[in-house]
Amino acid sequence: MPSMDTKPEYQHYIPQFLLRNFAHQYAPPGKSKAGKSGKRNRKKKMYPGDPVVNSLSLTDPFSLEECLVKRVCGLENMYENPEKPVNVRPRLEKQFGEFEGRASRIYRQIINAYKNGNQHVWLGRVEKDVLRKFMALLTFRGNQYYQRYNVDSMQEYHEDDKEILQAYMSKHGFTKPVDVWLQGLEKIIDLDMDLNIAAEDDEEDGEDWEQRIRERIYSPIAEMFIEHMSAMYMAICTPASDDEEFILTENCYNVTEGQTTAYYDSLTGKHVTLSPRFHMFAPISPRLIIVLRSNHLPDPLEDADPISKCWRQFNRLLFFGSQYGRGPKSILEDLPIRKAMNNYMDVVNGMLAPRHGWNQQLGMSDRFRFTIFQIPTRHVQTINGLLIDHAFHGSRIIFDRKDVFLDLMEWYLTEPCEVGKNILGEHAAKQSKYIDGLTDFMSREGRQCDTKQTIWPSEDRDLNQLRIQKIAEARFMEEVGRRKGEASFDVIKIHERLGGTAEDLAKVDSMFQTWIICVDMEWSSPTYESSRPNKLASLLEEYQGGPCCRFWLFLRHMRLSQIIGNRKLELGQVFSLLDKESCWESEDILTFAYPLIQGRELNVAMYKSFNESMARTRGPGCRLESLGYFSLFGNDNWRHFSPSYRPNQACRNDGAKEGPAIKEVVAIKKIVRPSLFGSVNRKALTQSLHRNQQRSCKEIRKIFETKNTAYLSPFDTKSGRMPTDPIQETKPYDIDRTKDESGIRETIYPSQFNDEDRKLPKSFNDRGSEPPPNLEDPRLEHQRQLEESIMTKVFGPLFLLVWASFGVAMLFFLWIFCYFLTHLLYLLSWLLSGLAWLLNGLAGFLEILWPAFYLTAKYFFAILAVGFFIYVKYLKYNRLI
């Protein structure tokens, strides 16, 4: 049990060595010289000569105050855990003290270089890493993070990462969220970022500092630290004018620059604000500030290389555009800074190039040259304006000179809301009151300001969906950091992660077939648009209530169907094709939220993510509810009436009442119509690109030639013929009695859906008008019209399509032929030129050797002639010839 007599300790979240850069010696009113001994100011508890800072207190009413450095920007027992023994509590504060000592020497080196008029500061890799890590710690140890995690129990924790934090606490035995925060700070301080650690430390198995920190602390804090260290570069800035200074706020290390968007969930009443992190700021003194700038923003030297510039722009769109839209801009886009130079790179023709002799290896002996950039008034005001705009989260604003600060405050209140004073989000009321307080303060200082502020409405958004997405992304990065192999979009691994079984794929195939049939069912009915939502809502409710693994497989099956089209596959083939990268989409990342988020909540989140991606890729209005056979496998106009459609109207005889034959025909049609759910593999619904198939000319001719089969239905899926008994009872076709052809057309082309009261559009009624009265046989005339319609509407476009394809193919082959012929001629010309060179060389060689060849040949032929003469004489002497 900790002792109750322990005196509270005031612990700073902004170190005193930084506060002293903004401080001056306290001089009581009426004293002629600062630092002269005198009585203590009992009210302020300050002695003459004590280091104090000028500050604007944000306690109503706002007022100027001098504060002791040792009693500002801190809290009592901020880093203490009262549940730990007394001798263990000061460990983190001691760690901070030792690390601050290392960082303060680097800060002093920068300040001295500036005071000496140097434009550059050289830092080693170790010094640079210490400085970067220290700035990251200033971000995490701030009051905002402390207030976030300093709750008594998880019931009082209401942030988006509540589930993942609770799982982490249960796994590591923590009882309070603040323990997780303190552990993260401690491990970050202890982290050794030496490049040689990976090669020398056998226990880490060659892992770098990013891998080690991911394994040691809470994943969201680890990823934020890695992004702070790796996704931004550091630059040192100073105002170009001597009449300008930087200010210091209590939360300045948590301020980020980027267009902020506020969201509001009308169902839960929660707010959230999102903004890209383009810049962060770390004031050093009134004349110096460190700016952290995103690697995705322009850099003069890197952008001189077109390839590097294109790659940077692509990454910017990937990381910022995907979440914040295509147009997030930085108001400091043109800030005149660049990355630090080093001792292994040079600038050649305006571009970076490796220095001659560099071994392409990074080392701890590398050195970096940081330029102290002079930035113009516009950028100084923008940076200070951003710090002022977010200062309402703290209790005071620290500055150096009063007149410079009042000028800055007057500019901030009157600028046209391009930098700040945009009231939005959860803290809109507090922010508006803060602006009014600043206006009243300036009025009391004798400066009347025409304050401008803009109120932005929050966008309505499903924040629970956003929360699940953040949880999934955090767990995904956690798996990636641990290198366990689970962080994969492989269908088998995701299926196993969601607790799937071997029978899931068969169930999902049944779900898939049922869904797409329900989408297409009775599409041409007048009540289709009103009945479909209720019908699919019931089916969707059933699907979302099932296991997450099946619903996820169902969504991926939908994506697969858009890729492969209308192909009949075995279940084993489907499972292998579901693993295609083209099937990966946004709902896959949500599976990493399992099992923290599961059941209907996860299924609804995946469903919404699926619809959002459909709207992005296929256009507004495209959702899961619009995906049926004909939208997945057919053309885009699948809901339009096809030319072969005919209404379900009874055939009449000269306007008389329906005869028995007509009634029997209608009855037969109702009997032979198969059920829509009779077979999920019906070719009439699954393999046709058109809702109603047209009959060929031979089928039409056969129908008119056969009286007993005049009412043959296209839905007889077994034998292609109608039942014979009812047909034999009907009367044969009589031309004299039946002058109206609508009944004949109705019986030849019955509707596929049982909607007898459906009306035919006017354009199709015109096509079905009666033939001219001067034709002898109306059946032949109708047949001729159908043949012409088929030839004109089907074979005409088909012929043009084939002819155009043939022409394109011929042009393509002609281009290929010319391409190869050109290269062949180039090759021949090269060979001939080589042959000419060879012959020319041979001629020169022969020209040089010709005298020797001539003499040799001359004496050779002379000797040959003498020998031949002697041989002939020899033969004659021996009488052989």
Image (cartoon, grey):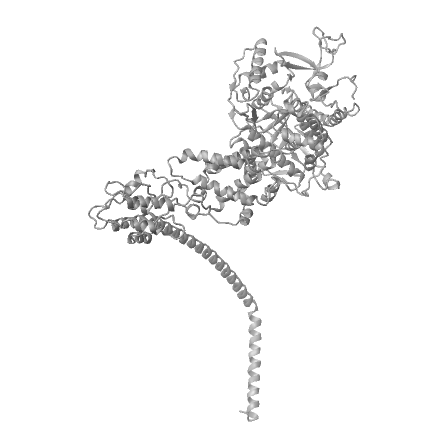
Residue 295 percent coordinates (x, y): 60, 33
Looking at the image, residue 249 lies above or below residue 367: above
Quadrant of the snapshot with the N terminus:
top right
- Where is residue 361 drawn, in percent x and y? 68, 42
Image height check: is 305 above or below 28? below
Give the residue at the far left of this rendering. 774
| Image x and y of residue 264, in percent | 53, 24
Query: Quarter-wise, where is residue 759 in the image?
Result: top left
In the rendered image, the residue lying farthest to the top is 30
Q: Which residue is drawn at 53% across and 16% down?
A: 414
- Asked if residue 570 shows in the view, the reply is yes
User: Viewed as shown, does residue 745 lie left or right of 453?
Assistant: left
Is 237 displayed left or right of 91 in the figure?
left
Q: Nearer the viewer, residue 855 or 593?
A: 593
Of the pair 70 and 588, the residue shown nearer to us: 588
Q: How many labels does the image show?
A: 0
Q: Which of 495 and 95 is in front in this view?
A: 495
| The one of 69 and 299 positioned closer to us in this rendering | 69
Could one spot residue 616 in this view of the protein? no
Q: Quadrant of residue 143?
A: top right
Where is residue 416? Give x, y as percent. Answer: 51, 19
